[in-house]
Image (cartoon, rainbow, N blue to C red):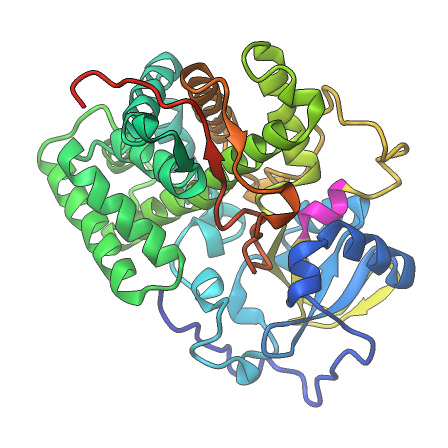
Amino acid sequence: MTDSPQVAGSAPPGYPDHADAVPLYGPRYQTRPVELYREMRRQHGPVVPVMLQGDIPAWLVIGYRQLHQVLNDPKLFSRDCRRWNVWDRVPPDWPLMAFIAYQPSVLFTDGAEHERHAAAIRSALSGVDQFELRFQCERIADGLIDSFAGSGKADLMNQFASPLPVLVAAWMFGLPEEEAPELARDVVEAMNGSAEAYQRFAATMNQLLQTKRESPGPDIPSRMLAHASNLTTEELTHDLIITLTAGQDAMANWIGNTLRLMLTDNRFALTLAGGRRSVGQALNEVLWEDTPGQNSLGRWATRDTQLGGRHIRTGDGIVLGLAGANADPEIRLDPHTGPGGNHAHMAFAHGEHRCPHPAPELAEVMAQTAVEVLLDRLPDTVLAVEPEDLVWRPSMQMRGLTALPVTFTPAYVAGR
């Protein structure tokens, strides 16, 4: 998390504010984003002038075809945030700074340099045995459930969905098991804005690389170190951080949002104690209707252009409206029917910066295993509050609950 440098002379003079911009923050966006996307589309079309926190102007792309165009043209819509033409208006403590501050990593590179990073990550992820991954997910999920099964109540977001992904990642990264809980705390706190936790997290990744250089193992850092891309220590550290954190929030909210759906929607609630098929359906429906990654400030125009009938200027920031694009009526002809087996959602993005193969498959193994283990262990789980009392996080980027309180019949745990 370094300060993002401004490219000298990159800001066009007299950059105009959007006169009719929609605030991409506040209670309305937090509670009813689907209605807001629908209203945006009706009033502005597929490319919407928006204001980010601090009244920073940007463009939100909610048209499926237009988003596809942006994601498939890195030469016109670059991932290099240093191109942004409003850096002079962005304060150092801006809430989204942690997500866009430039680093020499896979996240902020394009073309051949991006492929250099991405190839190492793809190779490292491909080495994860999916059968072993499922076993480890079951073991970790069981351990988390053991910690609250006897009480008859739990907060499934903070006691289950949130810690599980980073604990699984610690196993994939070859970290000693006794260090996993501390890493989990640092990652969660860092993603909530703690600079101190981020520094501890980065130091852990740096130390891990040193350890794996001396004693390689069957893990992601060792495979990245051995890859022909020859990434530097600094590059590897940032790429490991991104690989872990990119999955953490998304995975936690995918699990949490799926559990919420299954606990509140009769189509799924009726089969909580059985029906493996319903878990897969719920997971896919969440990626369409309540996708964890809602929006991402992630592209900057390299020259003046037209997009969805809008004039985009050199250096303009583009917010990828993944959730809005999923709801585009041009691809969702009947919004009242579920997605079924359709997997053409934007949850994993698209183009060269999409979630790298085989990360989506690994994520699905983790999410499905987590939900199945919980429902096997605690089949009579019910929501402890009314569905409308659940609180969504005030995040432009992520769609997830602050808590998911439930009750169930207390279960005996051996040794407790």
- The correct choice, above or below, for 396 with respect to 97 in the image is above
Q: What span is in magenta?
A: 321-326
Q: Quadrant of residue 345?
A: top right
Q: Position of residue 16 (x, y in %)?
A: 74, 84
The residue that appears at 51% across and 37% down in the rendered structure is 256
Asked where in the image residue 275 lies, by quadrant, the reply is top right
Would residue 375 appear left or right of 158 to someone viewing this image? right
Of residues 263 and 214, the one drawn nearer to the viewer in this rendering: 263
Task: Check if residue 110 falls in the magenta segment.
Answer: no
> Would residue 51 be seen by someone viewing this image from the given angle?
yes
| Residue 325 lies in the magenta stretch | yes
Relative to residue 289, is residue 78 drawn left or right?
A: left
Q: Quadrant of residue 44?
A: bottom right
The quarter in which the N terminus is drawn is bottom left
Identified at 67% across, 83% down, the residue is 12
Does 99 appear above or below 313? above
Q: Quadrant of the C terminus?
A: top left
Residue 121 percent location from the top left of the image: 39, 36
The residue at 72%/60% (across/down) is 60
Query: Position of 52 compared to 20: left or right?
Result: left
| In front of the other: 304 or 362 | 362
Magenta: main secondary structure = helix
Camera-side residue: 279 or 360?
Answer: 279
Q: For this view, does 34 lie left or right of residue 414? A: right
Expressed as whole percent of the image width and height from the top left, the position of residue 338 reads 78, 27
Viewer-closest of 330 and 352: 330
Residue 408 percent location from the top left of the image: 45, 26
